[in-house]
Image (cartoon, rainbow, N blue to C red):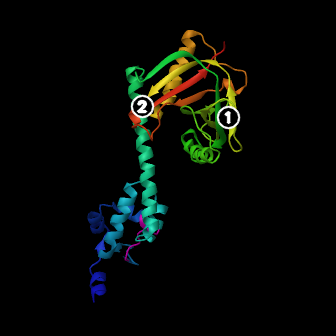
Amino acid sequence: MAFMAETTNLMTIGEFSSLTRLSVRMLRHYDSHGVLVPAEVDSWSGYRRYATHQLRAAADIRNLRDVGFGVSAIAALLAARGTPAWSEALGLQREALVDQHRAVQTQMALITRLIEGDTSMSITVERRTIPAMTVVALRDIIPTYADEHLLWTRMMPELARQQITPTGPCGVIEHDDEYTEQDVDVEIFLPVASGATATAPLAVHDLRERVCLVARVVGSYDQISQAHDVLAEHLAEEGLAPLRNGMLAARHFNLYLTTPDEVPEEELVTEVFVPLEA
């Protein structure tokens, strides 16, 4: 009897739209994609009518749309309500939105800097002689610069397995001859005692003494691109030339003097190095 009562009290598309806060246009769109099909469509007039039991689905559709899911994803998620797949998909979308939020914050900060014409005081530059050092390293191609952590998760257990003890802060060497947004060739490293040895996949490098232009960054890693801007300005203003001999010692590199597992983001200290011609 309850089902019969519901079918005899169907809502027009306008009434359903008012209750669900979904426009008539969107309800037709969801119908055409099989996401929210009316309970009844009049064969003569084509009018769509909806049942009260569809209100929950409509609310879920609106909420999923508002957090960024497209029509095809919404259809799949509705079928997964009450299963682990539902929670997993929402969790992944939350992570994506966090990344988007961070990217927008970075863009806003850059806009402010461009408007004000001000170089952040959190970046300072000096010319410095870097002593010779021995490092143990792991090199590979990673999807983007932001994926450097993939190498660290491989390297740290290997250091423990080979009983290698670092003697200073970690860093990364950029091997690409140009900036690339995908398939980045990088080599992470840690200083070790002179004469140290390692086996694959790790390698040991002896780096000679170099004169470098160094940008010191306090705060988020998002400022590293800005640090390169500042370094470029100093190179141009002072008539300095980057070292170009094709050897490892000529590569740009970063040192992480503090890391996220040690301090809050605002207290991170990173140094960006550009080796110079003598």
* Distance Cα–Cα, label 2 vs label 1: 33 Å
Judged from the image, the secondary structure of the residue bearing numbered disc 1 is loop
The kind of secondary structure the magenta stretch mainly shows is loop
Q: Residues within 10 Å of mark 2 (few under 14, many from 20)?
A: some
Quarter of the image where the N terminus is located: bottom left
Q: Does the CB distance between marks 2 and 1 fall below 8 Å?
A: no
Q: Is residue 178 left or right of residue 123?
A: right
Q: Nearer the viewer, mark 2 or mark 1?
A: 1
Residue 268 shown in magenta: no
Residue occupying image coordinates x 59% and y 28%: 253
Residue 35 shown in magenta: yes
Q: Which mark is residue 70?
A: none
Q: Residues within 10 Å of mark 1 (few under 14, many from 20)?
A: some
Q: Nearer the viewer, residue 277 or 192?
A: 192
Q: Quadrant of residue 74?
A: bottom left
Q: Sequence-wise, which precedes: disc 2 or disc 1?
A: 1
Q: Position of residue 57 (x, y in %)?
A: 36, 69
Does 148 sit above or below residue 72?
above
Q: Position of residue 271 (x, y in %)?
A: 51, 26
Q: Residue furthest top?
A: 238
User: Which residue is the site of mark 1?
Assistant: 196
Q: Which mark is residue 219?
A: 2
* Bounds of the magenta segment: 30-39
What's the residue type where badge 1 is placed? Ala
